[in-house]
Amino acid sequence: MAHLDKRAIDVSSTQGGVLTRSQALELGFSNRQIDYRLSVGRWQRVGDLGYRLIPVSDPRQLLQASTILIPDAVVSHGSASFIHGIEKHWPERPSISVHSRTTHALPDVEVHRCHDLLNTHVTQIEHLRVTTPERTIFDLASTYSLGRLSWAVVHLATEGRVFYPALEKVVAEIGRRGKPGTARMRELLESLDLGESDGSPLERRGRRLLDRAQCPCGFESEYPIPWSPRRRFDDAFPSHRLAVEWDSLRFHGQRDAFEADRHRDRSALEHGWRVLRFTWVDVTETPDRVVQTVRRMLDCRVRSPES
C-alpha cells in the first residue's frame, strides 16, 4: 500500500494538496481503503468531492485545490483582483465563482454563485481559470466606490489589460436591474462617454471647477496648441502658458494614448508651457484639490464680487 500512498501524495502535491474521489479510485484505492484513511486522519474530507492529503495555507494553492475539486470553478472577485494587479494583497479568504446550480461549499474559500459567467469572461493565468479583468471589474463594482473603480480601470488600461469596448460589452451582457454592481458600472461608463458636443461629462465637470477657481485671467476651451495648431489642449490659460487636460479613461487609458500624452507634455515644457492633468477620480472625489492646484499654478486670488 505504500506505493499507492506515494502516488496519491505525488498527484495531490501538484494540485494544491487535494485529491478527488475519482482520482483516488483511478489510482487503485478501494472505498474501504479511502474510508480507513479518513477515519485515522491521514486524509481529510474537503467538501463533497475530495480529500486533503497535504495541509496548505498559501492562497494560490487553496485556489488550485478549489478548481480541482470543483472543475467549473473560476477564480474571481478579490482573488482575481490580486492576480490582475488591482489589489496589492491577497484577500483574507480566497474567492471563486461557480454556477448557481452548484451547492458545494469549501472550507477557507469564499464561493460566489452566479448563472451569467460566460466563457468569454474567463481567461487562463498560470494554470488557473480566472475571470477576465473586465469581468473582475464588474464583480468588484458592488463593493468599490466609483473613484476606486475608476482607478482600477485606469491602472489596467494603461498597461493594456483592460479595453473600453470589452468593458462595455460585459456590462451589456450581464448588467440588469437588481444585479449588484450594475448601477455603478453604468455610472462608470457614463464617465467614459465622449459623445456630447459640449464635451465629455469629465470635461464639463472639470470646467465647472475652473469656473470655481475664479482666476481673473480666465481660460479658453479647445485651445489650439501654439506650436501644433491642428491639435488642441482641453482647456488653457494662455496668458500664463498653463494647459489643463482632462484624462478620460476611454482614450487616455490606452497605452498608445498614454505615451502620446507624455510626449505632448514634454513638448509643452520645451515651449515654456506647463500641463496639469486631472482624472475622473480627481474631479469627483477631490474637487477642492483640483481648484486649489489651479489657483496655485496661476498664483491667482479669488475675484471679489465687485471685480
Image (cartoon, rainbow, N blue to C red):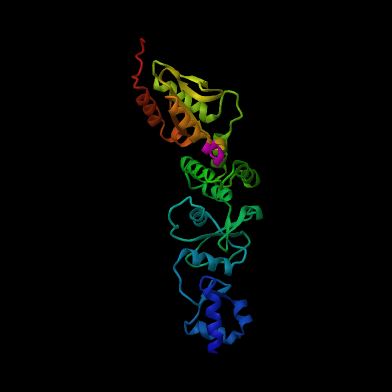
Q: Nearer the viewer, residue 93 or 84?
A: 84
257 in the magenta segment: yes
The question of residue 89 being in magenta is answered with: no
Quarter of the image containing the N terminus? Answer: bottom right
For the magenta stretch, what is the residue range? 252-259
Q: Position of residue 301 (x, y in %)?
A: 33, 19
Q: What main secondary structure does the magenta stretch of the protein show? A: helix
Q: Quadrant of residue 297?
A: top left
Outermost residue to the bottom: 1
Q: Nearer the viewer, residue 225 or 80?
A: 225
Q: Please tell me how many numbered marks the rendered image carries.
A: 0
Which of the 4 quarters of the picture holds residue 7?
bottom right
- Closer to the camera in the image, 152 or 232: 232
Tell me if residue 254 can be seen: no
Question: In the picture shown, does residue 37 fall above or below 215?
Answer: below
Side of 177 where 211 appears, left or right: left
- Spot occupied by residue 189 in the image (x, y as percentages of width and height): 57, 38
Can you say whether 237 is above or below 144 in the image?
A: above
Q: Quadrant of residue 194?
A: top right
Residue 147 locus on image (x, y percent): 46, 40
Q: Is residue 24 left or right of residue 234?
A: right
Residue 194 visible: yes
User: Residue 37: where, in percent of width, then height?
Assistant: 51, 84
Q: Residue at x 56, y 39 (%)?
A: 256
